Amino acid sequence: MATKTHFLISPPPKPPYLPFYPSPSSLPSKPRSFSISCCLSIKQTRNDQTTNSSTANKALESLHVAFAAGGTGGHIYAALAIADELKLINPTSKFLFLGCPNSMESTAIPSAHFEFKSIPAVQLARPFFSLRNLLLPYRLIKSTIKCYTLLSKFEPHIVIGTGGYVSFPVCLAAVLKRIKLVIQEQNSVPGIANWVLSLFADSVFVAFNSTVECFPRKEKCVVCGNPVRLSLKGLGSKAVSRLHFFPGLAKMAGSPEEVKVILVLGGSLGANAVNIALLNVYSQLLLEHKNWFIIWQTGVEAFNEMESLVRNHGQLLLTPFLHSMDLAYAAADLIVSRAGAMTCSEILATGKPSILIPSPNVAEGHQCRNASLMADVAGSRVITEDELDSTTLGTAISEILGDENLLAEMSERALKAAKPDASAEIAKHILSLVNLSAVKENQ
């Protein structure tokens, strides 16, 4: 009598890339050909992978991204840097920026060729228990409703908040609409709005390792550095850039290496203390050093006053705002500036020695902390506003520009601390998040 033998082959362990592979408990009791079972599994997985890939590609082809940014140049230019990177990676993307009317963002965003829509401002007065905050709930509800309506029309796949009080109602509306939300914190310590929004955000991009400890949900934090403008990643020739601001340098006798350019950045809105200190020392510096030149950005609000007080000088360029920041950084040997987070990141990315004068008026002491970090990692010279006067500023400038070894050391340290690929890294994370969301919705 012939003996019939059955060979039962157990299926291999469930691999991570085959989500529909049958488990041993789900196998039929009767033995089947292993080759048939395996073929069916692979076919189904391939179909799933094709469907998922098609869904992700469709999401990218019609990608809509909304930004919430405003108040200061730091918040605005961080958003623009991310938008530029996303556009570079995915040219078919569409963008919408939301901000306050008659503000810096209402001018800067359209100038960068992005769509801008205004929303009602909701600013938190300091201190918190102030009579000016009595109407805050009403203003917040009104602004959030407006944001909700605009987001419903635009239908973004993701909302990106880069800070400023304008970002809160936009991001709140995104949460209510269940749209993917990410925030980007430029400072070493987050503000109140970003701290609260981090509880609802899918990802939180931060500039410094130490910042992670400041957020309640640390697992959401991704340390990328601050995004800097694409134009600053490959600076042009120093000599050519200097001629843009000072055409007379072409006829100047002597070696080009002897020329030193000081770039003074009073902040996008101006810095009165910095302007006054420089006002009382610029003439002496230029008189003692015939090969020194100053590019002085006063800030829009302070320009008219400074222009009336500063006499015309061939070695000085006075301007309310610099639109060609790439040329300004390329031309400079030394930066004198406030310690805004984005300015600090740009100083590192361009490898420039710097003198930082942190503003004591910025909430949560952001600039003081930023300046302290810059002193540690890049050797930046820090002058507090209490210490600032024409003598301390003039002495610091002369000591740094008069020491070539110090200039080289500060430049080298700045470049080592820089994270020039921050915007690209953030953009890749955002696209990955959108892809993952699209695939999950399709399942």
Image (spheres, rainbow, N blue to C red):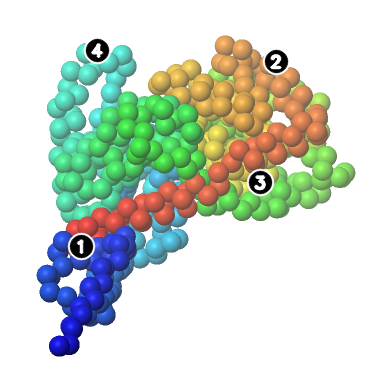
Nearest the eye: 64 or 281:
64
Residue 217, above or below 77: above
Q: Which quadrant holds the C terminus?
A: bottom left
In the displayed image of the protein, which residue is found farthest to the left? 29
Which mark's residue is nearer the viewer, 4 or 1? 1
Dot 2 lies on which element?
Answer: helix
Dot 3 lies on which element?
Answer: helix
Q: Earlier in the sequence, mark 4 or mark 1?
A: 1
The numbered disc on residue 391 is 2
Nearest the eye: 249 or 352:
352
Q: Earlier in the sequence, mark 2 or mark 1?
A: 1
- Residue 167 picture location, percent across and down: 30, 37
- Tell me, yes or no, whether the two marked residues, 2 and 4, touch with CB atoms within 8 Å: no
Q: Residues within 10 Å of mark 3 (few under 14, many from 20)?
A: many
Q: Residues within 10 Å of mark 2 (few under 14, many from 20)?
A: some
Q: Amino acid at mark 4?
A: Phe
- Residue 212 picture location, percent across and down: 42, 32
* Residue found at x 30% / y 62%: 13
Q: CA distance from mark 4 to mark 1?
A: 60 Å
The numbered disc on residue 129 is 4
Tag 3 residue: 330
- Residue 303 picture location, percent across and down: 52, 31
Q: CA distance from mark 2 to mark 3?
A: 27 Å
- Residue 139 picture location, percent across and down: 18, 29
Dot 4 lies on which element?
Answer: loop
Answer whether residue 85 is visible to the viewer in this image: yes
Q: Amino acid at mark 3?
A: Ala
Tag 1 residue: 23
* Residue found at x 39% / y 63%: 90
